[in-house]
Amino acid sequence: MAPSTQFEVSQPPSDVISAVVFAPDNTNRLLVSSWDRNVYLYEIAEGTEDATLVNKFEHRAPILDVCFGANGNEAYTAGLDCSVKRIDLSTGEQTVLSTHEKPVRCVVYSPQHSMLISASWDHTLHVHNTSAPNSTPITISLPGKPHALAASPSKVVVAMTARLVHIYDLPTLASALASPDPASVTIAPWQQRESSLKFLTRAVACMPNDAGYATSSIEGRVAVEWFEDTAESQARKYAFKCHRQTAPEEEGGGDVVYPVNALTFHPVYGTFASGGGDGTVALWDAEAKRRMRQYQKFPDSVAALAFSNNGKYLAIVVCRGFETDMEDFNSAGRTKVFIRELGETEAKGKGPK
């Protein structure tokens, strides 16, 4: 079994990173979006510990999220300038798909339905038919400000302020887009839930087997829930504390609690990784309800995580957070992207205790 290795990406962004994502059809290709107004495209050289900057794509304003589209040559971005853009990664051409009234916080692409969903701080979702990029997107009003968005093969989960969680059925959205007058269709959530976490949601990730999702909060907790709305399934949901450190006794003891900024599920084994403001990354077995391992502490907050499409790589974004203070904030030279090549069974769960 090959041992795990880890290396740092050269030429990282100059400011805080908002998102990292691997291509759906290329294990070695990844995108990084940053507050420095650029999207960075990297390629991992096969058989080496090196990732090369292939290109970067400048925007007018900081980029809050990025995702790949149908393949590794297409990307979509969410901008602080309120726009949702498509990037042709081969030519660099950028096209505005839609414009929200306030900054766009998240974008997620559904390959099963050729659909892009954007979530904005104007309390709306835009549902785009990427097969017809000139078509008008469907607008869905939300009861709260969205902070996190994730899609499974059949569902999209929107986590908002006030502990609100709405789950939409993707086939229903696809049917609405295919109707003669999509703008006139009224779309209701498939489910409306209250978050199991008492504080603001920072991240959400869906299970690759389409069974459920995980959320994390600013208060060092993660919750795991299932989509199926039966008493048996809902009884399985649980939450746990993580990304906390023991405070020195001279400071009163107790826990120092950090936000859990990132979640990502392994595409093969269904285990998941979490990253926090404490500078650590942990691997969890959702079914067995236990931590599998915790990696070494990084120099700054872990801001984003992503597994490659086959689970071979884990991208770890490390940059300054606001866990201590916001005065004289400067991330220059402190933003880093690490690529961990996992051992063959490193992310494989061991089953129930």
Image: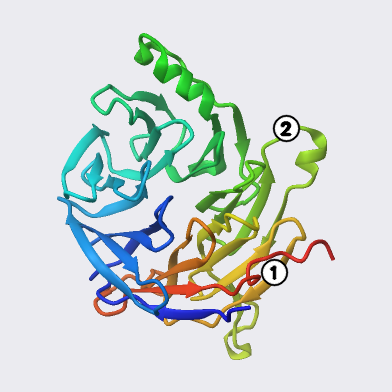
Q: Left or right: where does residue 15 sit relative to residue 315? A: left
Front position in the image: 112 or 233: 112
Amino acid marked by disc 1: Arg
At a point 40% along the width and 35% down the height, the residue shown is 117
Name the residue beneath numbered marker 1: 291
Q: In this picture, is 156 found above or below 189?
A: below
Q: In this picture, is 72 found above or below 51?
A: above
Amino acid marked by disc 2: Asp
Q: In this picture, is 179 found above or below 15?
A: above
Residue 101 location (% of width, % of height): 25, 34
Residue 300 location (% of width, % of height): 41, 77
The image quadrant that residue 31 belongs to is: bottom left
Determine the secondary structure under disc 2.
loop
Marks 2 and 1, how far apart at CA: 26 Å
Name the residue beneath numbered marker 2: 229
The reply to whether residue 305 is visible in this rendering is: yes
Residue 15 location (% of width, % of height): 25, 68
